[in-house]
Image (cartoon, rainbow, N blue to C red):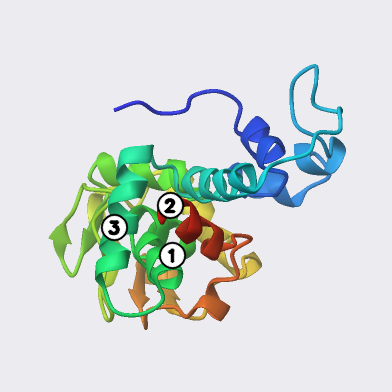
């Protein structure tokens, strides 16, 4: 499956917002968005007027890049959200937040979703005691995500867990760093997610 392998900082600059794709670096003065607040490329500093469609497309690309999905995957989540009860935009974000790779990132066992996806694919996590190596696995309320016993000496996992006290963890998860596990307490509301995404623009884009 096609994956973006170029500079992650260019993605943030293109979207004009911090997507926190590089973990700790995004919180420092080295953040590219803070240093160069204009799109990448030789024409990045030119002033251009964006159409309504362009604004909607940019918002969709921002969400897609944040969660590391290709277009086919993202569209599938949208149609699933449209089928379910509730506001389509909010349900879409909830589905994306419930992906296992996102939850591993949210509970602090990985510095970003890309690292979480790699760790999951290599079989280092279990959900409710069952080994899961599918990053797109959807977790539910009360699910327990745990690092396998044999994987608890992996340097990046140990380092990430040692820094948990310095991370602002979301209120819908509970983390037990000493035992290498985290628990899903509830499905987050839109206010709890605090994402720099205007999901209504995505709904408008796909509804055309």
Q: Looking at the image, which residue is at 53% across and 65% down? A: 200
Residue 36 location, x and y as percent?
Answer: 84, 35
Q: Looking at the image, which residue is at 51% across and 51% down? A: 63
Q: Residues within 10 Å of mark 1 (few under 14, many from 20)?
A: many
Residue 102 location, x and y as percent?
Answer: 41, 57
Q: Nearer the viewer, mark 3 or mark 2?
A: 2
Q: Looking at the image, which residue is at 18% across and 53% down? A: 132
Q: Looking at the image, which residue is at 44% across and 78% down? A: 188
For label 1, the SS is helix
User: Which of the pair 31/110 is nearer the observer?
Assistant: 31
- In the rendered structure, which disc, 2 or 1, sits on the residue that comes first in sequence? 1
For label 3, the SS is helix
Assign the N terminus to one quadrant of the image: top left
Q: Residues within 10 Å of mark 3 (few under 14, many from 20)?
A: few
Eyeballing the image, is 80 above or below 143? above
Q: Quadrant of residue 109?
A: bottom left
Q: Residue furthest top?
A: 42
Q: Residues within 10 Å of mark 2 (few under 14, many from 20)?
A: few
User: Which of the pair 158/76 is nearer the observer?
Assistant: 76
Position of 19 compared to 179: left or right?
Answer: right
Position of 179 compared to 144: left or right?
Answer: right
Residue 103 location, x and y as percent?
Answer: 39, 62
Residue 3 location, x and y as percent?
Answer: 40, 28
- In the rendered structure, which disc, 3 or 2, sits on the residue that comes first in sequence? 3
- In the rendered structure, which disc, 1 or 3, sits on the residue that comes first in sequence? 3
User: Which of the pair 199/134 is nearer the observer?
Assistant: 199
Q: Which residue is mark 2?
A: 208
Q: CA distance from mark 1 to mark 3?
A: 12 Å
**Can see residue 165?**
yes
Position of 167 compared to 109: left or right?
Answer: right
Q: Which residue is mark 1?
A: 93
């Amino acid at each position: 499956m096609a994956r973006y392998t170029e500079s992650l900082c260019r993605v943030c600059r293109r979207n004009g917002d911090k997507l926190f794709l590089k973990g700790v670096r995004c919180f420092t003065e080295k953040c590219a968005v803070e240093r160069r607040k204009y799109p990448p490329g030789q024409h990045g500093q030119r002033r251009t007027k964006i159409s309504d469609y362009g604004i909607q497309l940019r918002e969709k690309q921002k969400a897609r890049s944040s969660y590391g999905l290709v277009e086919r995957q993202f569209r599938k989540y949208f149609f699933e959200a449209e089928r379910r009860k509730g506001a389509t935009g909010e349900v879409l974000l909830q589905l994306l937040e419930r992906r296992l790779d996102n939850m591993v990132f949210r509970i602090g066992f990985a510095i970003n979703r890309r690292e979480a996806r790699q760790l999951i694919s290599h079989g280092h996590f279990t959900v409710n005691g069952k080994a899961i190596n599918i990053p797109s696995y959807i977790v539910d309320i009360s699910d327990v995500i745990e690092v396998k016993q044999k994987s608890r000496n992996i340097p990046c996992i140990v380092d990430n867990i040692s820094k948990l006290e310095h991370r602002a963890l979301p209120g819908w998860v509970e983390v037990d760093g000493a035992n290498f596990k985290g628990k899903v307490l509830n499905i987050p509301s839109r206010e709890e997610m605090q994402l720099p995404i205007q999901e209504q623009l995505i709904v408008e884009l796909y509804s055309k």
